[in-house]
Image (spheres, rainbow, N blue to C red):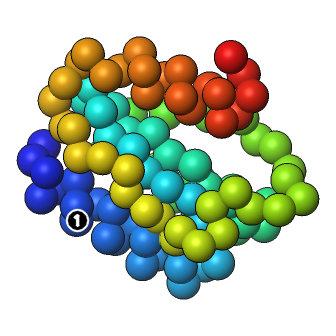
């Protein structure tokens, strides 16, 4: 996967998420994608179902399903935070980052 591929994925996700009132971000590193989705429970679950059933995805792990009083990423329909598509060195750092956002250190 190239940086251009990751850019295309992020643009597509941003377009689809904005149309559904979802916010969040997408990280790519160490050969993995990491994401956060925010919105109404119904819309987030519908989007997750679509992601899960897409044959291009595998080994999906949902780290947390929490209701929040305010969105953390309200201005981001799917901002992309990095395009490191090959480095395995960053995998542990990204895992720790996502777990800290989910308060599961």
Q: How many marks?
A: 1
Give x and y (percent) for residue 48.
Answer: 58, 53
Residue 91 sits above or below residue 8 on the image: above
Along the line of sight, the residue nearer the viewer: 44 or 103: 103
Give x and y (percent) for residue 2.
Answer: 10, 47
Image point (61%, 55%), residue name: 37
Residue 102 in the figure: left or right of residue 75? right
- Quadrant in the picture for residue 103: top right
Residue 63 sits above or below residue 90 on the image: below
Along the line of sight, the residue nearer the viewer: 11 or 75: 75
Q: Quadrant of the C terminus?
A: top right
- Quadrant in the picture for residue 19: bottom right
For mark 1, does the 10 Å Cα neighbourhood hold few (<14), some (14 to 19), or many (20 or more) residues?
A: few
Residue 55 visible in the displayed image: no
- Quadrant in the picture for residue 92: top left
Residue 45 in the figure: left or right of residue 12? right
Q: Residue furthest bottom?
A: 19
Give x and y (percent) for residue 87.
Answer: 19, 24
Residue 48 in the figure: left or right of residue 59? right
Q: Which residue is mark 1?
A: 8
Give x and y (percent) for residue 75.
Answer: 59, 73
Image point (32%, 41%), residue name: 28
Residue 56 sits above or below residue 12 on the image: above
Residue 14 visible in the displayed image: yes
Q: Quadrant of the N terminus?
A: top left
Image point (74%, 62%), residue name: 71
Q: Residue furthest right?
A: 69
Assign a secondary structure to mark 1. helix
């Amino acid at each position: 996967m190239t940086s251009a591929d990751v850019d295309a994925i992020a643009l597509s996700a941003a377009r689809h998420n904005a149309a559904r009132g979802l916010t969040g971000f997408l990280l790519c590193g160490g050969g993995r994608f990491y994401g956060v989705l925010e919105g109404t429970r119904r819309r987030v679950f519908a989007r997750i179902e679509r992601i899960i059933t897409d044959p291009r995805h595998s080994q999906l792990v949902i780290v947390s399903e929490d209701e929040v009083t305010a969105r953390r990423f309200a201005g981001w329909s799917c901002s992309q935070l990095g395009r490191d598509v090959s480095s395995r060195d960053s995998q542990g750092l990204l895992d720790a980052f996502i777990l800290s956002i989910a308060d599961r250190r």
